[in-house]
């Protein structure tokens, strides 16, 4: 074993290889769920809003989660209806092309998936962070 990695088919796979493998497997199963679970979690969201919510959670939330406590940090701004409404074409281009700090998703998301994310974001209320405990 050691720092060289695990043996796989007579060859060693470096630790970074195992990490990538685990991430790929997680990615396959992260988006899967049972229809009954989807119906329960869907609540009052339309199909487009619910699909957008799932896409947002898979592709965007790690950097764009709402700030819960004043001193917590996120990579990107917290997104809400306020961010999107009236700016849909601009937001669509940001998602497609990316920015210096955000990758573009033109090859990772279908146009309908981007539209669904925007549709979902229109349902998200802006939240104010709570004061950090002293």
Image (spheres, rainbow, N blue to C red):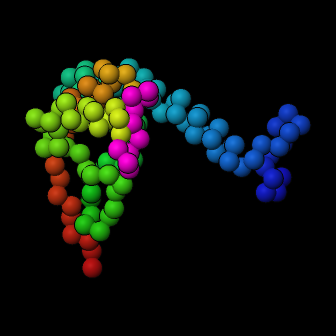
Please name the residue shown 58% across and 35% down the image.
24
Q: Is residue 40 visible?
A: no
Between residues 89 and 134, which one lies in front from this camera angle?
89
Please name the residue shown 38% across and 50% down the image.
101
Between residues 86 and 133, which one lies in front from this camera angle?
86
Residue that sits furthest to the left in the current view = 86
Q: What is the magenta segment's predominant secondary structure?
A: loop
Residue that sits furthest to the right in the current view = 10
- Residue 56, image quadrant: top left
User: Quick check: 116 left or right of 8?
Assistant: left
In the image, which residues are magenta?
99-108
- Residue 58, image quadrant: top left
- Counting the numbered discs, the total is 0
User: Quick check: 37 left or right of 50?
Assistant: right
Between residues 129 and 73, which one lies in front from this camera angle?
73
User: Quick check: 130 left or right of 108?
Assistant: left
Between residues 1 and 104, which one lies in front from this camera angle?
104
Please name the residue shown 35% across and 39% down the image.
98
The percent coordinates of residue 9 (x first, y second) are: 85, 33
Please name the residue shown 26% across and 31% down the image.
92
Q: Is residue 128 above or below residue 26?
A: below
Is 38 colored magenta in this rendering? no
Residue that sits furthest to the bottom in the current view = 134
- Residue 89, image quadrant: top left
Q: Is residue 62 visible?
A: yes
The percent coordinates of residue 131 (x first, y second) are: 21, 69
Q: Quadrant location of the C terminus?
A: bottom left
């Amino acid at each position: 074993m050691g720092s060289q990695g695990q043996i796989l088919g007579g060859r060693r796979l470096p630790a970074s290889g195992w990490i990538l493998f685990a991430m790929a497997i997680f990615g396959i199963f992260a988006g899967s769920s049972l229809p009954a679970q989807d119906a329960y979690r869907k609540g009052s969201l339309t199909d487009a809003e619910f699909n957008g919510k799932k896409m947002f959670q898979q592709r965007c939330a790690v950097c764009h989660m709402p700030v819960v406590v004043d001193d917590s940090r996120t990579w990107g701004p917290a997104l809400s209806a306020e961010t999107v409404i009236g700016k849909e074409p601009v937001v669509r281009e940001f998602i497609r092309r990316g920015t210096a700090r955000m990758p573009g998703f033109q090859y990772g998301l279908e146009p309908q998936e981007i539209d669904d994310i925007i549709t979902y974001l229109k349902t998200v209320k802006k939240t104010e962070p709570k004061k950090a405990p002293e």
